[in-house]
Image: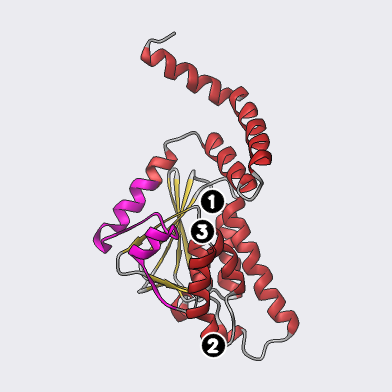
């Protein structure tokens, strides 16, 4: 269903499930466990096959009770929250189609690189199940008008368009996807894990604050960060290296 591998500072979690890597309850719970168990400095979220993820497993939706529907979307919300609450930045490596909750998964990741052949859509409106939870991540990634267009029309968005809109960081030829993601992961992993973790946490806490409140919050974070041993050591080393002290 998933594979989890560690290579020094980089953890790789790969979706390897049936039915186009559908986010079944079992798949989502396995992802949550793997994310929380990651020990490196960066997590890469990849997938097998031509589809990154087709979203929720509709077999769990048909004929479900209210309690079962509540469980599915509660676990989905927990998964998305876990991606943004763990200390490591999570990079989506999107080799193919990402639709509905699969698109939500990409939009939720901290960073994302996709193959040029990949595409994205929120097609729930076409099957009577509006992509309301994907809407949350999508709106925050690409803005109101573009998100509403995707949600109301179900129009597929190409990888290049997704990069222009801010859904992903960039689109690359499929043959370069692995190396592009590995290079980005190595760049992130090269920084202090303490510094990256405090920065990631602060980013999501301030993002929806009014500007004045965000500055007050960020100032307090940076004050604490500046006093940390790792910051003191690295600033001192930076100055010594350049002979400016």
| Contact? badges 3 and 2 (CB < 8 Å) | no
CA–CA distance in space, label 3 to label 2: 24 Å
Q: What numbered label is drawn on residue 38?
A: 1
Q: Could you tell me which secondary element the residue under label 3 belongs to?
A: helix
> In the drawing, does residue 58 fall left or right of residue 14?
right
- What residue would you read off at disc 3? 141
Indicate which disc, 3 or 1, sits on the residue closer to the N terminus: 1
- Which residue is drawn at the image coordinates 48% and 69% (left, top)? 103
Q: Is residue 232 above or below residue 168?
A: above
- Which residue is drawn at the image coordinates 54% and 51% (left, top)? 38
Is residue 227 a member of the stretch shown in magenta? no
Q: Nearer the viewer, residue 66 or 39?
A: 66
Q: Is residue 26 above or below residue 201?
A: below
Q: Nearer the viewer, residue 171 or 46?
A: 171
Q: Could you tell me which secondary element the residue under label 2 belongs to?
A: helix
Residue 189 in the image: x percent, y percent? 44, 41
Whether residue 59 can be seen here: yes
Q: The magenta stretch spans which residues?
A: 155-184
- What residue would you read off at disc 2? 127
């Amino acid at each position: 269903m998933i594979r989890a591998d560690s290579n020094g500072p980089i953890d790789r979690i790969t979706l390897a499930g049936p039915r186009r890597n559908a986010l079944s309850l079992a798949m989502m719970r396995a992802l949550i466990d793997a994310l929380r168990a990651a020990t490196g400095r960066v997590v890469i979220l990849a997938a097998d096959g031509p589809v990154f993820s087709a979203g929720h497993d509709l077999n769990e939706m048909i004929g479900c009770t209210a309690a079962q529907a509540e469980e599915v979307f509660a676990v989905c919300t927990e998964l998305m929250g876990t991606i943004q609450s763990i200390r490591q930045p999570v990079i989506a490596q999107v080799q193919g189609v990402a639709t509905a909750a699969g698109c939500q998964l990409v939009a939720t990741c901290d960073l994302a690189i996709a193959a040029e052949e990949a595409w994205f859509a929120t097609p729930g409106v076409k099957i009577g199940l509006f992509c309301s939870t994907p809407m949350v991540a999508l709106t925050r990634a690409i803005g109101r008008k573009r998100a509403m267009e995707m949600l109301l029309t179900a129009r597929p968005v190409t990888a290049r368009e997704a990069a222009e809109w801010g859904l992903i960081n960039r689109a690359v030829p499929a043959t370069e996807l692995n190396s592009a993601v590995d290079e980005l992961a190595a760049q992130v992993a090269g920084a202090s894990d303490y510094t990256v973790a405090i920065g990631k946490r602060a980013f999501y806490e301030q993002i929806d604050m009014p500007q004045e409140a965000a500055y007050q919050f960020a100032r307090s974070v940076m004050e604490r960060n500046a006093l940390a041993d790792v910051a003191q050591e690295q600033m001192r080393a930076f100055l010594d290296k350049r002979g400016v002290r």
